[in-house]
Amino acid sequence: MTPSDVELLRFTHDAIDDWARRDPRHTNWPVVYVLDGDGRGRGARTAVYVGESLNAATRMRQHLASGTKGELRNVRVVVDETFNKSVCLDLESYLIQLFSGDGGYRVLNLNGGITDAAYFNRDRYRPTFAGVFEALRREGLFTRSIADIENSDLFKLSPFKALTQDQAIAVEDILEGLFTDLAGGRPSSIVIQGRPGTGKTIVAIYLMKMLADIQVATSDDVLDPDSMFAEYFTQEHRALLTDFRLGLVVPQQSLRTSIRKVFRKTPGLRADMVLSPFDVGRSGQRFDLLVVDETHRLSQRANQPSGVLNRDFRTINERLFGADDPRWTQLDWVTACSAHQVFLVDAAQSVRPADLPTAALEALAHDARRHGRFYPLTTQMRVRAGGDYVGYVRAVLRPSPGGVVRADPRAYEGYDLRVFDDVALMRSEIVAMDGAYGLARLVAGFAWDWKSKKDPGAYDIELDGCRLRWNGTDRDWINAPGSLEEVGSIHTVQGYDLNYAGVIIGPDLRYDPRTRRLFVDRESYRDMRGKERNSKRDKPPTDEDLLRYIVNVYGVLLTRGMLGTFVYVCDPALREYLRPFLGRARPGSTTAV
């Protein structure tokens, strides 16, 4: 492939006219262009717009005439004699995603045009995109390497993601159903079901950006006619969203903090659109649409992390329903405070008794199916393993005397999966993987007291002479300074991606070789709110209840790593049970057999 040229010109009529006369390709050839500020005036050097066109000069004149890109000053045009329309659409999407993940600019593009389409010789063209990126980086348009950008939350949680086929179908079906219900004045409730790594959070964020874009789109915002979402960028649909109030509900504090950072940097979105369930319940205004990520982590009436939240739970129930009855949950708050809802769900990720009951989640899914508003996500985006790795792990963690789970290497073909006999050795390998790939972290089940919370000099976990501390912060821990030296809990990693995860399965989970069953060591399980009953009417969780939650915790932890998962198991019997299923590492070695 020939190297691409990046041509720089001013974003003015005279400069564009002069550039158009220099080469016939400037008015009749597929190119990609980047508009940005130049450091002058209010808002300069803060915004960027990426486009593609067969007639770049005419398209740039249209941008100037519209006035919507008035804060931009420079144009950089990528010209390559081998490019075709498909290549340009692909490169345009690639650069938009990297600009969004880099965080140096506000990306002015709509997200509806992001594509991930196959085309002839795509594997030959794709390597040239890195050269275009480096050329733009040398001119100061990017501040970090591609690897650093792709490891950032801004990239992983960006609304400018290329959707998988089932994600795109789900978004299109949601939009079609939502606009039909809006036009008919009917309420609606939609459920999206997906296992870990299928991109539920991405769908939620993408949908929020899409609706915000439709609200404000102008004639200058032209989507490619082949885009499956182009039909929604019309005056008719925009009118249905007039004064439309929408919010994204995220139960977990850490993930909520990370998404707010993304929304703060994204035109059309605001940090205050990202809500806790309590924000919804306290709000005196009604929402038109609430999108709920990790719906399974919404809470029922139970002891909250603080007395203030216990008071607020009671007050919200009384205001919305007239009484603080234990039957009212945060799910009921969402439906009472909005006309339309989109729920993203995976019941197997409930990790505490306070989470929504399985029966409530099943009823939600049943109702959505009955109304034709249930959409499954199946494509695995996180774990780069062959077969159904997520299903395989879940089956391994739920053995039964009558059932036979066979060790199946195809479930993790090409995936770095190892069992370690020495936690210090696993820790050193995680540090090495972080140096090589970034985003490698140790995580563990809640089987040790959090002593270091009150005494920063104390250690929480001591195994094989290796001393470790729990996460020093519960907000955006993965990216916090010092997190590589700490151990994250379920509450810091659920909803996030890692490149490598080192999972410590604590003494709270054990295995009985005689009955061939997993069982709980209740005394070793240190999550106090995981053991307590939700209300005076409820009984404390049984050992079977705890087993379900603890198995769910480890199921989540074992599916965080995109490139690999390392496992250390405290209980010797459980270690020997898991060894053939999750790979092997010889004692004193990190080599998988």
Image (spheres, grey):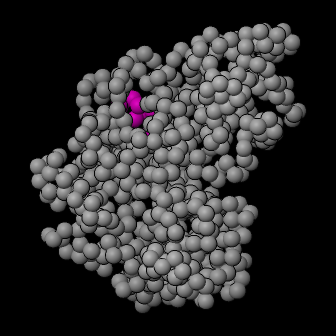
Asked whether 163 or 481 is in front, the reply is 481
Segment colored magenta: 170-178
Near-viewer residue (575 or 291): 291
Residue 386's image quarter? bottom right
Residue 417, by quadrant, is bottom right
Q: Position of residue 300 (x, y in %)?
A: 25, 59
Query: Residue 288 at what x, y percent from top left?
Result: 31, 33
Residue 71 is a magenta residue: no
Task: Locate the N terminus and report the quarter of the image it occupies.
Answer: top right
**Identity of the residue drawn at 30% across and 36% down:** 287
The residue at 60%/33% (across/down) is: 107
Q: Which of the image's four quarters has the C terminus?
A: bottom right
Q: Horizontally, is 340 left or right of 207 in the view?
A: left
Above or below: residue 114 compared with residue 436: above
- Residue 138: x and y, percent? 81, 39
Describe residue 491's horizontal placement relative to residue 416 as left or right.
left
* 175 within the magenta span: yes
The structure residue drawn at horizontal position 61% and vertical position 89%, both measured from the top left corner, is: 465
The reply, left or right, for residue 205 in relation to residue 1 is left
